[in-house]
Amino acid sequence: MSTEVWGVGAVPAAWTRQHLLDIESLTAEEINVILDSAVAFKEATAGCTQKVPILAGRTCANLFFENSTRTRTSFSLAARRLGADTVDFSSAGSSLSKGETFIDTAKNIEAMGTDAVIVRHRTPGTAHLLAQNLGCAVINAGDGPHEHPTQGLLDILTIRERLGRIEGLTVALVGDISHSRTARSNIWGLKKLGAHVIVCGPATLVSKRWEELGIEVAHDLDSILPRCDVLNLLRIQFERQTTRPFPSVREYALLYAMTRQRLERAKPDILILAPGPINRGVEVTPDVADGPHSAILEQVTNGLAVRMAVLWLLLGARSADEIPG
Amino acid sequence: MQPNRSLLIEGGRVIDPSQDLDRVTNVLVEDGRIAAYDAVATGGEDVIDAAGKIVSPGLIDMHVHLREPGREEDETIATGAAAAIAGGFTSIACIPNTEPPIDTQASVEFIQHQAARADQCNVFVVACVSKNREGKELAELGQLVQAGAVAFSDDGSPVYDAELMRRALEYCQMFDKPILNHAEVRELTQGGVMHEGLVSMILGLPGMPAVAEDVMTARDISLAEAVGGRIHMMHVSSSGSIELIRRAKKRGVRVTTEVCPHHFTLTDECLRAFDSNFKMSPPLRGQKHVDACLAALADGTIEVICTDHAPHAREKKMRELDQAPFGIVGLETALGLVVTRLIEPGRLDWPAALAKMTINPARILGIDKGTLRIGADADITVIDPDVTWTVDPLKFKSKSTNTPFAGWKLRGRADTVIVGGRVKLQTQEADSPRRPVRAH
């Protein structure tokens, strides 16, 4: 079945990686391989609703050391759509509370015969450390404020589907850039594919230093709005902030919430993304979140497609000989 | 103790910055003291062939964490002192952030007792500025001086309260002892894991900005300038604090400072490996700061090279980057890094580099060490300047292996280490072939 679904059948030769740890180290070609595969899966499975059991017999472990609903569910579903078994591990009540290091925990899970470990952790670099210490594939499902590659990829896929391209677009990431892994993954991916990236938010959460990466830094949303093709509204990460970076949520919303009134200043076909979970009334008002410019629910479907693509690229058959039945 | 046989160190380049000495000569050691130069062998003494080697006053490291009492799983006084010898140090000063902290005569004497038992290098005690290292009330500094404390520090933590620092600087003038301070404004570094800069921004790791060091350095300089006393800024790492110290010295403020090899060698780029062996406080900073450290070593603003040897058991460092403790071991790599990073590239000549590891720290601590003048204790480090060796943490004498330099090829190593006229170390393994020491 897989061959018909694919037309290609085997993992493209351009993909040689064992892990997906970040977007910073991917090439534009590799990003496109993932996006194209995601599109193919979406088409082959009627919008990711049907099974393609090309990873039957494989096991994916969700290692979530930090809370998640959407991402964990999405990875689990993606694995099952591909026929793989999934096991869930969450840190509550685990050996971590007995003092075991997270590397030991992961090695134990791997020893039970997992082919891929999907890890989320509050500390940057944990996926990278696991990749150094485990033999199986490691997928970063968010390491603190560092990266969340599948989120970045699904955002980019959504933009590409809606607007037909990435190159030449102006994309503004609005909000808590300092603490956002989604921001970092988007910045790398969008830059590599040729978009103009603006990071916009309060000066305490959007450092001037971002300019050193060749992106634009702005603090006044209204002034950049008319130039933007896409707005990606990032959640304020209250839980990661050690000091209060702005005086009040009210003041933040006044300056940065995407409202119906602000929408009038934007291009008529502006695309609005929000990686979720969203704080309605803080980053975006309900009329905008649920309005025609919003692609928030498409992002969720694309998340499933991207994760199926990533699992297949990391675990799938590398040549026609390996393709089952 | 048995009187030692005489010892003749033959044919080495003797460099003693304390007396501006730099020439090839023979050094005779008798009764544990430097007895004569230009001596010739009579057949009655042990001879160490130092041809092609450098004969230096025994190296001094004024910033070492020995962990005992309280954290013997990381290091003990015996293993730390053995690591010092392996690294070429004949004297170390240990920092009092142990459990309990060294804030009483009894605890100072415990360290001295354990050091004597270990019988490796000389161990000098830095005692706490404040009772229980809590930063609230002065410890009994006078009694601590009587017990033998050579300086005071709450390192591990800064002396946070400006009034306490002012009182400490005033009070210590009675004993002519320096206060060693770790400069860090904690409100600016809370939760921090690495230097705040482009790399921390990309990695999403909480930053410790350089200005956190600068602000407290400025405070300490101002206090020392206002009330007198001697302030020694520990492990300086930022260009801003270095410039503050440089200017203060020009005004005549009694401020001294030290730098660690990792701060003049590595940058925050290393954190891209997410390896906790690159996590220390102050953190590895950007190239601009490394360049400032190198310039300040060259112009004399930084007069001491120390290690901030901070052993942590491997299981503690194996944790996530934000959970792993700050600090790295340094005793067994410092000399090689000084040779490789400072002397070989011509940033410092041998006398200037050795001054920062011998007489300069001795003067700051007020100890009668760091010199080869006639009559001085025969603490001598014979250095092979040409040997190339590979850092292998599993061969460390230290109990801990938390070094960022594993696998590095370094030039220069202690070849023979003599403490009080007794040979504590002889030729170590090297990558390159070398002559054995000749002993009669």
Image (spheres, coloured by chain):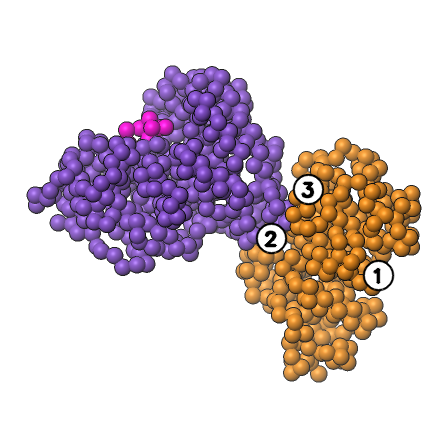
Query: Residue B268 at what x, y percent from top left?
Result: 54, 46
Whether discs 2 and 3 lie on one chain: the answer is yes
- Residue tagged 2: A125
Q: Which mark is residue A208?
A: 3
- Who's purple, chain-wise? B
Relative vertical location of residue A141 with respect to residue A4 in this rendering, above or below: above
- Disc 3 is attached to a residue of which chain? A
Which type of secondary structure does the marked residue at label 3 adopt?
helix
Query: Residue B63 at what x, y percent from top left?
Result: 40, 36
Residue found at x 79% / y 56% = A169
Q: Quadrant of residue B171?
A: top left
Residue B365 belongs to the span the image colors magenta: yes
Q: Is residue A176 left or right of residue B240?
A: right
Question: Most prominent secondary structure in the magenta stretch?
Answer: loop
Q: Which mark is residue B231?
A: none
Whether discs 1 and 3 lie on one chain: the answer is yes
- Who's orange, chain-wise? A
Closest to the observer: A93 or B196?
B196
- Disc 2 is attached to a residue of which chain? A
Callout 1, which amino acid? Leu
